[in-house]
Image: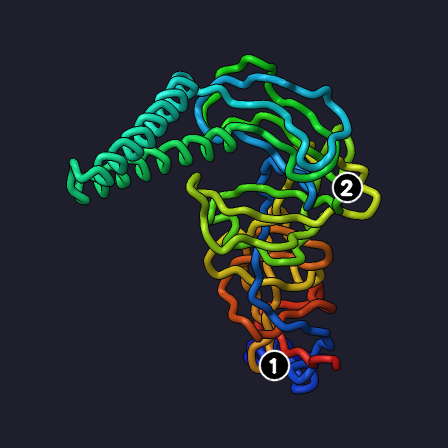
């Protein structure tokens, strides 16, 4: 068949124009909604195992630890565990005792002289006031002396932390008594870490080569004098951890990053080192480059030009091209 050479351009144009059926063809896909995502990082901290009956005894004042000391082991409630000897305290008590004796004798003499009509009542009242003040001063020292005695507030297993004769500053731990209450872990963390923790969060616990899983029990509402916040962590059953042990904790902390979204892992398409998702806009697919932030199970945290609630293709995304029409399969 012979064609006029002037008709060839029109024939080529007809071949290049797709038919209306091709233009109408749609690719069936499945989609998922884009969600706002949060990434987490683990922050390490030290925690101490405690129990309700476990107590740490500290020096009430600066002084030297003196006996009688008991042997480590079982101890009953109220048992005397030691005394704190404060320099010059015994001399102060003796001087206060002498002052009280002198004031009492002076009051007796003043009362006799008043009865004999030698002095006025005002002098008797002054002597009585001096005697009362001397007695109050001695009572205060006697109460302080009682506080220098270290006694067991609960029954349990006693363990001294310092030897006898040690010079201690006020607040220095002296001994621990471990009761039989259900243990938990206390950790002190910075406020910025505590602020991201939620009751029930899983906490990884490491001790002597073992790994355990605990959960956040409570988060303190204020910082202590050290500027740290107390976090209490529940232990799993049969953890066999004893009060007084120190463990390493890995706390889940949310990492704040802008424009972060969560999508199913199937929505992310990799081409070499580049990642992108197919966003569905008005029935057509649009490729959106994304940056992978983290992977958590079957979900991927990404950053890109997306918005929460938009649809991204999770199935059929390997057959798409920019602008192609798609039919969303329910």
Residue at 56%, 77% in the rendered image:
281
Q: Is residue 243 above or below residue 267?
A: above
Count residues near mark 1 (Cα–Cα under 10 Å), then give few for <14, some for 14-19, many for 20+. Answer: some
Left or right: 29, with 107 as reference point: right
Instruction: Name the spot of residue 24 as percent of width and height, x first.
Output: 66, 85
Residue depth check, mark 2 versus mark 1: number of the one nearer the observer: 2
Residue at 69%, 81% in the rendered image:
327
The secondary structure type at the circle numbered 1 is: loop
Instruction: Name the spot of residue 176 as percent of width and height, x first.
Output: 65, 30
Instruction: Name the spot of residue 244 as percent of width and height, x first.
Output: 68, 33
Question: Which quarter of the rendered picture does the N terminus lie within?
Answer: bottom right
Instruction: Name the spot of residue 330 as percent of width and height, x first.
Output: 75, 81
- Asked if one can make out residue 171 in the rendered structure from this viewpoint, the answer is no
Q: Which mark is residue 146?
A: none
Foreground of the two, 259 or 195: 195
Residue under circle 2? 180
Looking at the image, the residue that sits furthest to the right is 238
Foreground of the two, 206 or 259: 206
In the rendered picture of this protein, how many numbered marks are placed on residues? 2
Residue at 61%, 51% in the rendered image:
294
Left or right: 320, with 150 as reference point: right
- Asked if one can make out residue 185 in the rendered structure from this viewpoint, the answer is yes
Looking at the image, the residue that sits furthest to the bottom is 20
The secondary structure type at the circle numbered 2 is: loop
Q: Is residue 285 above or below residue 161?
A: below
Q: Going from the N terminus, do you reach mark 2 or mark 1 first? A: 2
Q: Which mark is residue 283?
A: 1
């Amino acid at each position: 068949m012979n064609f006029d050479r002037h008709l060839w351009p029109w024939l080529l144009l007809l071949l290049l124009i797709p038919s209306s059926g091709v233009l109408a063809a749609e690719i069936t896909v499945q989609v998922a909604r884009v969600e706002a995502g949060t990434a987490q990082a683990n922050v390490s901290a030290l925690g101490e195992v405690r129990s309700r009956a476990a107590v740490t005894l500290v020096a009430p004042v600066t002084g030297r630890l003196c006996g009688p000391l008991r042997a480590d082991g079982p101890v009953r409630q109220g048992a005397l565990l030691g005394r704190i000897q404060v320099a010059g305290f015994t001399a102060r008590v003796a001087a206060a005792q002498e002052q009280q004796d002198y004031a009492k004798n002076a009051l007796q003499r003043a009362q006799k002289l008043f009865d004999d009509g030698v002095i006025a009542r005002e002098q008797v009242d002054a002597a009585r006031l001096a005697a009362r003040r001397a007695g109050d001063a001695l009572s205060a020292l006697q109460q302080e002396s009682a506080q220098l005695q270290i006694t067991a507030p609960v029954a349990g297993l006693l363990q001294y932390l310092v030897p006898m004769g040690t010079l201690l500053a006020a607040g220095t731990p002296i001994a621990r008594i471990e009761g039989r209450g259900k243990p938990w872990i206390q950790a002190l963390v910075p406020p910025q870490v505590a602020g991201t923790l939620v009751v029930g969060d899983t906490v990884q616990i490491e001790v002597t080569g073992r790994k355990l899983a605990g959960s956040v029990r409570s988060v303190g509402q204020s910082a202590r004098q050290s500027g740290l916040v107390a976090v209490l962590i529940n232990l799993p059953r049969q953890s066999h951890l004893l009060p007084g042990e120190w463990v390493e904790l890995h706390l889940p902390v949310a990492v704040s990053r802008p424009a972060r979204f969560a999508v199913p892992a199937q929505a992310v398409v990799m081409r070499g080192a580049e990642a992108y998702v197919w966003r569905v806009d008005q029935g057509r697919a649009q490729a959106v480059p994304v940056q992978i932030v983290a992977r958590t199970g079957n979900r991927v945290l990404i950053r890109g030009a997306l918005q929460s609630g938009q649809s991204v293709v999770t199935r059929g995304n390997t057959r798409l091209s920019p602008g192609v029409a798609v039919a969303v399969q329910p």
